[in-house]
Amino acid sequence: MKNVKRPITTASAICLFLLLGCSIFVAELLSHLFTHALSPISQWGDALLDSTLLLALLFPSTYFFVFRPLNTQIAERKTAEAKIQRMTNLYAALSQCNQAIVHCTSEDELFPEICRNVVQFGGMKMAWIGFIDPDTRMVRPVASFGEGTEYLQDIEISLDADSSFGHSPTATAIREDRPFWCQDFMHDPLTAPWHE
């Protein structure tokens, strides 16, 4: 569910002022009750009692009307900044990949450069590129970069849907010609054959 920003309306401002006015009235009333119940106290003692009671009554309203919305705004801003940073990283990776396409003279030079750019500029942990072997219908890695690339050495990804190795995110994306998003590789049941 998306948080909706609620601007301060006239009604909420009136409620805040009424709450402040009531808090001051109650603080004064309690102060007078205490000063009559206690032995006579000095003018400074009366002012201290007034301010203490007023703070005790104003704190909850201050929290709900000031600090709580402020915390929500800070959290929303941090979320927006993180999203902007992710997008900036992806655009930087795309730009670097475009430059690699222009400057590289062969696939052997291009593919490792693309993987490196995706990791270093895009913020990914690992990237790899694979080709489909037309005879075996297996995906064969040809380039990779980043953490965990050693798992690609003995990887088995089949495009055959009946194979136990045919249900990986990679095989599903190729077979169905669509993106496949796996948010938690280690806990997704479809990736179980590739867990170490």
Image (cartoon, rainbow, N blue to C red):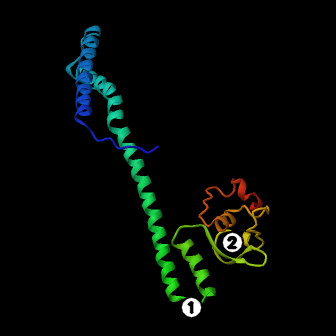
Instruction: Say left or right for 120 vs 169.
Output: left
| Location of residue 52 by image quarter | top left
Question: Element under label 1?
Answer: loop
The percent coordinates of residue 44 (x first, y second) are 22, 23
Give the residue type that dot 1 points to: Thr
- Judged from this view, the residue extending furthest toward the top is 37
| Location of residue 149 by image quarter | bottom right
Residue visible at 72% across and 61% down in the picture: 167
The percent coordinates of residue 59 (x first, y second) are 34, 30
> Which disc is residue 47 wearing?
none
Residue visible at 74% across and 78% down in the picture: 134
Q: On the image, numbered disc 2 is attached to which residue?
A: 149
| Residue contact between numbered discs 2 and 1, judged by CB atoms under 8 Å | no
- Judged from this view, the residue extending furthest toward the bottom is 105
Identify whether 154 is placed above or below 45: below
Give the residue type that dot 2 points to: Thr
Q: In this rendering, does residue 196 appear at all? A: no
> Which disc is residue 105 wearing?
1
The percent coordinates of residue 122 (x first, y second) are 52, 69
The number of discs equals 2
Instruction: Say left or right for 75 vs 147.
Output: left
Report the front residue among 18 and 27.
Answer: 18
Report the front residue among 44 and 192.
Answer: 192
Residue visible at 33% across and 25% down in the picture: 56
Tag in front: 2 or 1? 1
Report the front residue among 161 and 147.
Answer: 161
Q: Earlier in the sequence, mark 2 or mark 1?
A: 1
| Location of residue 31 by image quarter | top left
Instruction: Say left or right for 83 vs 164.
Output: left
